[in-house]
């Protein structure tokens, strides 16, 4: 068999599936993707669009930067919205400022490109930060703002046109094994390798493996404002002191314990729903706001209480020209406690790839490229 005929099939056209499709095609495989919906509708279109290397643990930071380079390549090729805005963590408490200082002091060793900012420097750089309330800030230059809805709409065409990737939409995969992938439409497709990138769908394929895995579904509530007037720009994407509790990058900071203890004591309602607050901007100028985290057996329906708490915390730190909320939604991702991805052999020639938690937009391109680089190229 000619090596170029080796066939990789992928279940799921979210960012994880399409990142693997891109990496496989570049490594010389023939690639076919199967997606149950008519377009990506899962976590990959419901997020902030934050390519967020600053949130990664130090050991994953270089891979996050490589992912960002791939985002650059894709957005330049397609003209998709991409803003290299960097990010600003904005804090209003001494314990949070101490975390930032500890992080910045250790940052050069890990490669993080960050600097501490005074209140006036934060306010000068960030038009969306409320005046007179911050203690300090930390600017990081490595973050990029994309528009997930647009990116996930353009990526399939890019893969098809530039890399010959074939995508079957509206096609549920019901089984994969013994070199055959079966669909609910009765299709049977041969493959050399199958990758299951099914996001938080733990029930349809290999349910027993997912049940025994460290993955848990996590539900996040989100909001979006109307487009801001007059072309108003957010500047750097914004994160709060509460966000320091959320990302692995800050775990090594000794003062983080004090932040967590204060929030647990004074605002237990935030811990109950895993609330921290961040803001990005979409291509129409709307501000994307969130988020909360509920694990496991959450309700189907969204809670107004969560939205209100998020808005309460957002208003403390941020100030946008127009706070009118245009949309509310939730997204669900597969949370992996303890690693940046979940990868396991489900059957001979079939691997599950996912568990990217809150970092799938940041890490998927890099993770997928690394996966195919660690094997013999077939091109
Ligand atoms: C609200 C929210 C905000 C976030 N913000 C960010 C952020 O700013 N930056 C960041 O880096 N990450 C962020 N994340 C995380 C990121 O969005 C996820 O890690 C990533 O989207 C997961 O991608 P996925 O492809 O695994 O899942 P999904 O996007 O859910 O895709 C899985 C796909 O598989 C398909 N599928 C499943 N089973 C089958 C089957 N049997 N047959 C056919 N198709 C199937 C589904 O239809 C779906 O389209 C956020 C997540 C959420 C929910």
Image (cartoon, helix red, strand yellow):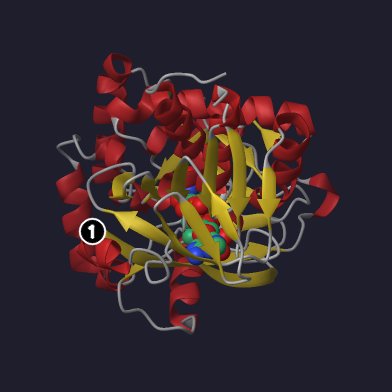
Residue found at the far right of this picture: 230
Q: Answer with the quarter of the image where residue 268 lies.
A: bottom left
Q: Answer with the quarter of the image where residue 264 lies.
A: bottom left
Q: In the shown orientation, is residue 288 left or right of residue 194? A: right
Residue found at the far top of this picture: 109
Q: Answer with the quarter of the image where residue 270 lies.
A: bottom left
Q: Residue at x 40, y 83 (%)?
A: 299
Q: Is mark 1 within 8 Å of ligand 1?
A: no
Q: Residues within 10 Å of mark 1 (few under 14, many from 20)?
A: some
Q: In the shown orientation, is residue 280 left or right of residue 52? A: right
Q: Residue at x 75, y 30 (%)?
A: 162
In depth, the one of 265 and 67 nearer the eye is 67
User: Disc 1 marks which residue?
Assistant: 213
Rendered location of residue 276, percent (x, y): 39, 58
Instruction: Examine the rendered structure and indicate whether residue 150 appears above or below residue 55.
Output: below
Rendered location of residue 243, percent (x, y): 37, 50
In depth, the one of 100 and 69 nearer the eye is 69
The reply to whether residue 340 is in sight is: yes
Which quadrant is home to the N terminus?
Answer: top right
């Amino acid at each position: 068999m000619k090596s170029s005929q080796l066939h990789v099939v992928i279940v799921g056209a979210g960012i994880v599936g399409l990142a693997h499709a891109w990496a496989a095609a570049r490594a010389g495989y023939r690639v076919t993707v199967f997606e149950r919906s008519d377009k990506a509708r899962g976590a990959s279109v419901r997020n902030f669009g934050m390519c967020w290397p600053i949130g990664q643990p130090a050991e994953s930071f270089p891979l996050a930067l490589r992912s960002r380079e791939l985002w650059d390549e894709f957005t330049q090729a397609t003209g998709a919205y991409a803003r290299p805005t960097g990010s600003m963590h904005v804090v209003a408490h001494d314990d949070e400022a101490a975390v930032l200082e500890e992080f910045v002091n250790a940052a050069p060793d890990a490669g993080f490109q960050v600097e501490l900012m005074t209140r006036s420097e934060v306010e000068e750089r960030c038009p969306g930060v409320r005046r007179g309330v911050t203690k300090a800030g930390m600017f990081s230059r490595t973050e990029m703002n994309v528009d997930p809805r647009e990116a996930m709409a353009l990526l399939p065409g890019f893969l098809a046109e530039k890399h010959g990737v074939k995508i079957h939409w509206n096609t549920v995969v019901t089984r994969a094994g013994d070199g055959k992938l079966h669909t609910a439409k009765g299709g049977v497709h041969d493959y050399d390798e199958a990758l299951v990138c099914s996001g938080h769908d733990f029930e349809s394929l290999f349910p027993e493996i997912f049940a025994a895995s460290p993955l848990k579904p996590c539900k996040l509530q989100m909001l979006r404002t109307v487009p801001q007037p007059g072309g108003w720009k957010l500047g750097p994407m914004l994160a709060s002191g509460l966000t320091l509790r959320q990302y692995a990058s800050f775990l090594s900071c000794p003062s983080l314990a004090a932040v967590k203890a204060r929030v647990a004591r004074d605002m237990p309602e935030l811990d109950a729903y895993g609330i921290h607050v961040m803001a990005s901007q979409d291509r129409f100028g709307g501000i994307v706001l969130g988020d909360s985290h509920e694990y496991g057996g959450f309700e189907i329906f969204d809670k107004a209480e969560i939205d209100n708490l998020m808005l309460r915390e957002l208003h403390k730190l941020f100030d946008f020209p127009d706070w009118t909320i245009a949309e509310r939604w939730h997204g669900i991702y597969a949370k992996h406690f303890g690693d940046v991805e979940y990868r396991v052999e489900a059957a001979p020639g079939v691997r599950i790839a996912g568990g990217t938690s809150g970092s799938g937009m940041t890490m998927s391109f890099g993770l997928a490229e690394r996966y195919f680089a660690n094997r013999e190229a077939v091109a």
